[in-house]
């Protein structure tokens, strides 16, 4: 039998409510007052967009959230969504010095949300594009975090920018691909409006190569930025994969964000293949839809999974079950509908590969299988559109990490299609870095520094902003050991 | 257990903690509650011709999330009749014979002062405090700080009081004066038994930036108030010490001004107070805070082997000297404990922008010392250039980690030399001038 929605709308609204409540004004004030206002603060170094975090927190502490929002959005146009989806415990908050005083780090993400919510709720304009335009035109391919980060920075540097987006809605994964309880699609769409308010033109539903020729683009625009993200979900390559109840986890998440929740069909016993952050998002939301169980199946062990520790803890606390060292062999069906999985146990061999354990097969009943084993790279598409563009063996566009410039001097890139798939905030930072490099490419002059350079930077290597070379808190930990 | 019992010019109380004259000492109900909570004395809210108060009376200075680090009021003396106040004093004294009850008075003419002093004695009060300090309202009528700011007037009125007083008289001094010892000497000359200080300081705590009316707003107007609370403690300590050290004063002191815990109390005692008066902290937390004061002071005295508060009173007074007598050859420098350093670099920027530019930021890789938990790759860490450190203390004050930056004495072989010695030696041609700092 085809799957049906399980719960009425009222229950779903409660189940999908935001996990982290916004800070009330007094909470924000007290929290902001805890900030030590470090000089050359480690949190800034850990932010891939180089937000001057102590500066914005100080503004909240002194009762000026709009000014705080300006500080945030000047550095990171997607400050509102990053406030909600950044893995802050491994970025800014992970680097907070209070942790070393055995105190909880400052809740930077929630304070950032407080400031950005404030200007959104009060409809305040804190950013503007310069009146003087350079007359240079730049095309941005993809309206995801990288493209938006690039377009906003370019607009603020005085360039004419047009974004071309294949999907009907802009925002990329922020609109389509993040757990609902972390980030509502409205927040992402409001951020796109903010980018447009800087004069950026946006054309959705345009597929490059089909609706728009690359040659036309290269003729009409002085530079291109490719922020095309990743492609389709990787396949399991097992029998039964094409059954209707075997779905790409990202499609499942997208449906939750684009259709009324009460219309989304849910399984009662849901299997999720893979153990990254998308798998966690899918599993926790399957339970929110009313599933009796959600089971994450992973061919390796607990220590190998790519999901963040805090996501794993969340999933466990919500009742997600885990089958480690287990892989699917076949999707089982009755009357054309999924009824379970045939699985086997695995063991990691000397080469690091997960081999099947002989005679270990077993079956388990499931009525929905979500696959989250990674996304394909956009290699074929890129080869077709830009035959001269250098692409790595792993399928990422080759670029200078500091400028985003590719082997074709007028083409720049950033985000998942260049870094292989990282955080939203990395994509924004890379888009922004590329915009600044495009500015130099077009005008011959470097963009003004984004953050007051520290006096110590001159003395001993990189410091100050995380924009160029962000540190990561867990890397800090590793170095300390 | 150290003996906390107190005797200020003959006014005895089981401990030195007295409720200061103010809103917490307004009624017998409050006095009973105070004594039940453990206070040693109550200085009654100032008695005089009953006044009429305004509505909206207090305002405060908040700092970050901390409320009321400073407090301001435009409330006047008691708004109750003298009959009621003296009757209640008698009632309280009857129930608490071993606790101190002091009548605070403020009136105008010699006859009135005589009348109120006699009624205080008749009510059984243990002492009288003359309120020469209120900096708002009453001073416009020639009383309060209008008296305290003119030592000759204060001396005159005090002498009227002494004509009829048969119980100890304390003169309460206003800090709104250039030299508080002048007022203290006037009290001495008039024959007062003790002084109490400080009363509140003229203040405006804050301005409403929408209405442009300072707080506390009475409609669209405000008035200068009297400032008190933790923020005034340093000012009060300075004045208490000045009076304690003045050979022309030599009167027992009841210390007042921002006392909120046992440590504040011990500091006031060490700088020459015999009893201690508290108001703002009670207005913030209630009478129960005296428990910490009694327990903490007692434990402190025990830890120092002191048998009574008399062993502590005045202990720090001789440590205050004129600047010109300080040793110019004493040197201390800042030392950073890298095991504790969390890497906030506040010490660096404070020294760099606010002091003498003697902290460098170093690449951790260049340092041979072990680094603490704050190590962040590539992030320079602070290192004190001891040869240039002037020992100003600023870095140790801004450092947010206890005992991370300590100021250590650098022993040297130079003999002690004060500015006065230096001037003398220069005059005698015994040494060359010290070159100016580059």
Image (spheres, rainbow, N blue to C red):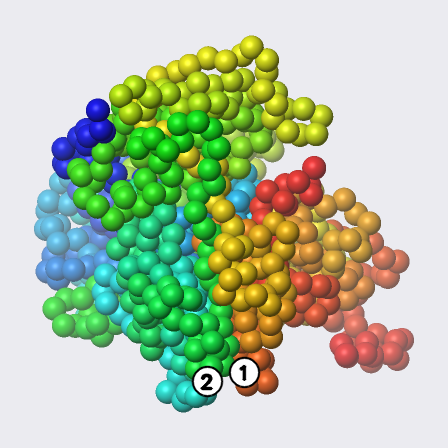
At x 46%, y 68%, the residue is: A150
Q: Is residue A481 above or below residue B226?
A: above
Residue A442: mark in rendering: 1
x, y percent for residue A145? 42, 59
Q: Horizontally, is B297 left or right of A457 in the view?
A: left
Label 2 residue SS: loop
Which residue appears at 56% of the width and 26% of the height?
Answer: A300
Q: Residue at x 40, y 76 (%)?
A: A161
Q: Which mark is residue A136?
A: 2
Find residue A272 and report its horizontal and vertical position in percent: 40, 30
Q: Are marks 2 and 1 in contact (CB under 8 Å)?
A: yes
In this view, the residue farthest toward the top is A359
Disc 1 crowd rating (10 Å Cα; few below 14, some 14-19, many 20+) is: some
Compare marks 2 and 1 and give the one earlier in the sequence: 2
Q: Is residue B221 left or right of residue A214?
A: left
- Residues A163 and A432: in front is A163
- For residue B83, the mark is none
**Image coordinates for residue A250, horizontal then vertical, percent:** 37, 43
Q: Is residue A393 visible?
A: yes
**Residue in the foreground of this view, choosing between B290 and A390:** A390
From this viewpoint, is residue A318 visible?
Answer: no
Q: Is residue A56 left or right of residue B285?
A: right
Quick one: SS at disc 1? helix
Residue B394 sits above or below residue A252 on the image:
below
Front residue of this view, candidates A306 and A351: A351
Disc 1: host chain:
A
Q: Is residue B421 above or below residue B383?
A: below
Q: Mark 2 to mark 1: distance in Å?
A: 7 Å
Residue visible at 74% across and 71% down? Answer: B420
Query: Where is residue B261 drawn, in percent x and y?
Result: 43, 41
């Amino acid at each position: 039998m085809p799957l049906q929605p399980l719960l009425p709308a009222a229950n779903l609204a409660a189940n999908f409510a935001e996990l982290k409540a916004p800070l009330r004004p007094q909470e924000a004030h007290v929290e902001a007052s805890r900030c030590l206002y470090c000089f050359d603060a480690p949190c800034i170094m850990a932010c891939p967009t180089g937000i001057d975090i102590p500066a914005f927190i100080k503004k909240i502490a002194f009762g000026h959230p709009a000014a705080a929002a300006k500080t945030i959005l000047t550095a990171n146009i997607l400050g509102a969504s990053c406030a909600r989806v950044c893995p802050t415990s491994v970025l800014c908050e992970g680097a907070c010095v209070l942790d070393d005083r055995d105190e909880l780090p400052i809740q930077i993400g929630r304070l950032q949300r407080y400031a950005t919510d404030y200007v959104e709720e009060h409809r305040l304009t804190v950013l503007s594009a310069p009146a003087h335009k350079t007359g240079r035109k730049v095309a941005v391919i993809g309206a995801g975090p990288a493209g938006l980060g690039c377009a906003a920075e370019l607009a603020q540097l005085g360039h004419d920018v047009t974004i071309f987006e294949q999907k009907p809605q802009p925002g990329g994964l922020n609109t389509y691909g993040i757990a609902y309880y972390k980030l509502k699609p409205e927040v992402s769409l409001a951020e796109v409006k903010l980018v447009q308010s800087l004069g950026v033109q946006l054309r959705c539903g345009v597929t490059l190569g089909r609706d728009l020729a690359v040659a036309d683009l290269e003729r009409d625009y002085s530079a291109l930025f490719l922020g095309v993200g990743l492609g389709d979900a990787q396949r399991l390559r097992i029998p039964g994969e094409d059954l209707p109840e075997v779905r790409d986890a990202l499609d499942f998440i997208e449906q939750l964000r684009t259709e009324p929740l009460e219309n989304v069909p849910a399984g009662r016993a849901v299997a999720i293949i893979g153990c990254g952050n998308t798998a966690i998002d899918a599993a926790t939301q399957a339970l929110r839809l009313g599933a009796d169980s959600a089971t994450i199946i992973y061919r390796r062990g607990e220590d190998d999974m790519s999901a963040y520790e805090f996501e794993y803890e969340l999933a466990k606390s919500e009742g997600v079950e885990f089958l480690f060292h287990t892989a699917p062999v076949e999707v089982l069906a009755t009357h054309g509908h999924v009824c379970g999985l045939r699985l086997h146990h695995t063991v990691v061999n000397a080469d690091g590969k997960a081999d099947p354990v002989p005679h270990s097969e077993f079956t388990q009943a499931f009525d929905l299988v979500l696959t989250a084993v990674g996304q394909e790279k956009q290699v074929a598409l890129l080869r077709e559109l830009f035959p001269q563009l250098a692409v790595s063996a792993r399928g990422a566009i080759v670029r200078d990490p500091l400028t985003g410039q590719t082997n074709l001097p007028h083409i720049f890139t950033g985000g998942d299609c260049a870094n292989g798939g990282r955080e939203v905030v990395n994509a924004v930072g890379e888009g922004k870095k590329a915009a600044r490099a495009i500015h130099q490419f077009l005008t011959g002059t470097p963009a003004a520094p984004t953050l007051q350079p520290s006096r110590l930077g001159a003395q001993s290597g990189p410091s100050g902003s995380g924009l160029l070379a962000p540190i990561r808190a867990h890397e800090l930990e590793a170095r300390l050991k | 257990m150290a003996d906390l019992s107190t005797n200020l010019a003959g006014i005895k109380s089981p401990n030195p903690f007295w409720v200061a004259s103010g809103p917490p000492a307004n009624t017998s109900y409050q006095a009973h509650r105070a004594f039940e909570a453990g206070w040693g004395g109550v200085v009654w809210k100032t008695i005089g011709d009953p006044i009429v108060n305004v509505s909206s009376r207090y305002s405060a200075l908040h700092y970050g999330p901390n409320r009321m680090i400073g407090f301001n009021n435009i409330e006047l003396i008691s708004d109750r009749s003298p009959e009621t106040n003296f009757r209640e004093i008698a009632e309280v004294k009857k129930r608490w014979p071993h606790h101190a009850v002091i009548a605070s008075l403020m009136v105008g003419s010699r006859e009135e002062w005589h009348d109120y002093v006699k009624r205080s004695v008749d009510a059984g009060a243990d002492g009288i405090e003359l309120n020469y300090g209120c900096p708002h309202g009453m001073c416009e009528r020639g009383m309060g700080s209008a008296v305290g700011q003119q030592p000759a007037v204060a001396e005159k009125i005090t002498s009227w009081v002494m004509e009829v007083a048969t119980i100890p008289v304390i003169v309460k001094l206003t800090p709104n004066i250039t030299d508080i010892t002048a007022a203290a000497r006037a009290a001495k000359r008039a024959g007062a038994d003790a002084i109490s200080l400080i009363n509140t300081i003229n203040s405006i705590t804050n301005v409403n930036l929408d209405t442009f009316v300072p707080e506390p707003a009475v409609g669209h107007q405000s008035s200068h108030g009297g400032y008190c609370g933790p923020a005034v403690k340093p000012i009060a300590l300075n004045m208490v010490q000045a009076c304690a050290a003045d050979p022309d004063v030599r009167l027992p002191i009841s210390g007042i001004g921002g006392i909120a815990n046992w440590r504040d109390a011990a500091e006031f005692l060490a700088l020459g107070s015999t009893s201690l008066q508290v108001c703002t902290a009670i207005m913030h937390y209630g009478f129960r805070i005296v428990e910490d004061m009694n327990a903490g002071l007692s434990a402190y005295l025990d830890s120092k082997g002191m048998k009574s508060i008399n062993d502590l009173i005045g202990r720090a007074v001789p440590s205050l000297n004129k600047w010109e007598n300080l040793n110019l050859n004493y040197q201390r420098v800042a030392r950073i404990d890298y095991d504790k350093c969390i890497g906030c670099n506040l010490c660096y920027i404070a020294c760099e922008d606010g002091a003498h530019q003697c902290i460098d930021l170093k690449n951790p890789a260049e340092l041979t010392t072990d680094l603490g938990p704050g190590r962040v790759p590539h992030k320079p860490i602070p290192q004190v250039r001891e040869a240039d450190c002037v020992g100003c203390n600023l870095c140790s004050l801004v450092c947010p980690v206890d005992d991370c930056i300590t100021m250590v004495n650098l022993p040297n072989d130079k003999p002690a030399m004060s500015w006065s010695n230096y001037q003398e030696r220069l005059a005698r041609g015994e040494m060359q001038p010290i070159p100016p700092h580059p």
